[in-house]
Amino acid sequence: MQQDLSYRDLFDLANDAILITSAETGRILDANRQAEALFGYTREELSNKNLRDLLHADEPDRVEQFERQLATSGCGCGMTADLPYLAGDGRRLVLNVSCSVQQISGTNVVTRICRDVTRERELEGELSRHATRMEQECDEKQRQLLESQTQLMQAEKMAALGSLVAGVAHEINTPLGSVNSNNDIFALTFQRMRDFIRSHPPADRADAEKELADILSIVDEAIQTNRMACERIVKIVRSLRNFVRLDEADRKMADIHDGIESTLILVAHELKRRITVVKEFGNIPEIECYPNQLNQVFMNLLVNAAQAIEAEGSIRIRTWRENDSIRIAISDDGKGIPRELHSKVFEPGFTTKKAGLGTGLGLSICMKIVQNHEGRIDLESDVGRGTTFTVVLPIRSRAKATSCETPATHTAHN
Ligand SMILES: Nc1ncnc2c1ncn2[C@@H]1O[C@H](COP(=O)(O)OP(=O)(O)OP(=O)(O)O)[C@@H](O)[C@H]1O
Ligand SMILES: [Mg+2]
């Protein structure tokens, strides 16, 4: 049986297509039956062709590089690659070609054993496209998750701040009411005392009157101080209420200066007598907005400014109108922000503060609120010289109620 098979038979019986080409010219010198079936040409037709006629033109550089490398590799060398070929019926074939160069009767010939991998490569391509799509979907899902997580954190922060402020306002208000009514009782009681003494003069009238006058003046002074202290507390409570504006969760026309003033009273402890606040309020109209949301913006910007000033310094608040918008610039002469961080500071979670001091959400919340008001925040900063955040807000906006809004979870009562 073995003796009956010639090399020609073995060549033709091979499972893969085999082309023998001239290494110099690329002319096809021989082809087996599988090659006839694969390319759709007879052996005669193939022997009238050049390898170039069988190559697909869509990747000329890669094919040319392969052929050049093969030509220079010399005899006995083998090279394998997946290359695009062209069948007789115009189909594009991807063939895994294993080439070796041999010298036969003084001429260099290339044996090309070709395996059709068109379908495999198509499936691989589909698989990789599918994997890329899945990866993109996964990235998108992750981004959405991060965004909703951030929104949740922001909403929680707002809710916490809102109920904290409302709670404080409520807590102060109750004892304040008692102190205030006590003041009235004091005043009335001492008036009655005065009247009584006047109508029941003691024996040594001159001495007693002087003594009593002293006592009464001390008490009067105490009542006066008490009243002033109460007035101050009333003002703080009003600011707290104004700040959260629990009764005004709706969009309305509001005076931005009121919001800034209330916020300043609330951040007074952050300024700790070391920071001078300079107000340069211009003539600006009321704007259509969610005042409680904007107060959160001023609060964050003022606290950041105060935290950027290490020892003593100043914060300047300027407001002015420009066409259909108003601008609020909050400048500090603190440490400044390096240029490369300018775009980062608005990212949720970005902070340079020690753990426990900053969550890195302040500016991202500001940005969200301002964007919701169809405005923007500009940043100018020089390291060592200071920073200015300018909030630009349209006078009329279509601001929507968002998750940034302070939920009215705790309402202060009188
Ligand atoms: N006025 C400023 N001067 C210098 N750096 C600033 C100023 N404002 C913000 N930054 C920088 O931007 C970072 C982000 O500010 P952001 O208000 O978002 O978060 P935070 O202040 O760190 O924390 P949080 O406000 O949540 O308590 C700060 O950590 C700080 O590095
Ligand atoms: Mg901050």
Image (cartoon, rainbow, N blue to C red):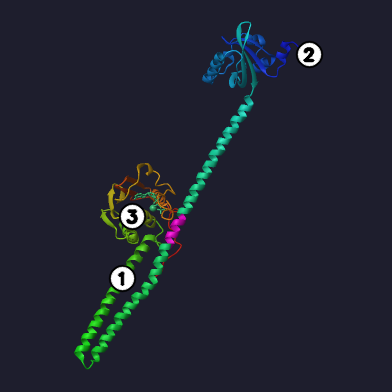
Q: Amino acid at mark 3?
A: Ala
Ligand 1 is within 8 Å of the C-beta of the residue at disc 2: no
The quadrant of the rendering that contains the C terminus is bottom left
199 over 6 or under it: above or below: below
Amino acid carrying mark 2 in the image: Gln
- Foreground: 385 or 133? 385
Q: Residue at x 58, y 20 (%)?
A: 84
Looking at the rendered structure, the secondary structure element under dot 1 is: helix
Q: Position of residue 341 (x, y in %)?
A: 38, 44
**C-beta proximity under 8 Å, tags 3 and 2:** no
Q: Residue furthest bottom?
A: 203
Q: What crowding class fits label 3: few (fewer than 14 Cα within 10 Å), some (14-19), or many (20 or more)?
A: many
Q: Inspect this view and state whether residue 371 appears.
A: yes
Residue, disc 1:
229
Ranked by sequence position, the earlier of labels 1 and 3 is: 1
Q: Residues within 10 Å of mark 2 (few under 14, many from 20)?
A: few
Relative horizontal placement of residue 118, taking residue 292 as reference (left or right): right
Span of residues in magenta: 155-163
**Count of numbered badges drawn on the protein:** 3
**Nearer-the-camera pick, 71 or 87:** 71
The residue pinned by badge 3 equals 306
Task: Relative to 71, say whether 127 is above or below.
Answer: below
Q: Picture coordinates of residue 102 (x, y %)?
A: 62, 11
Label annotation for residue 2: 2
Mark 2 and mark 1 in contact (Cβ < 8 Å)?
A: no
SS under mark 3: helix
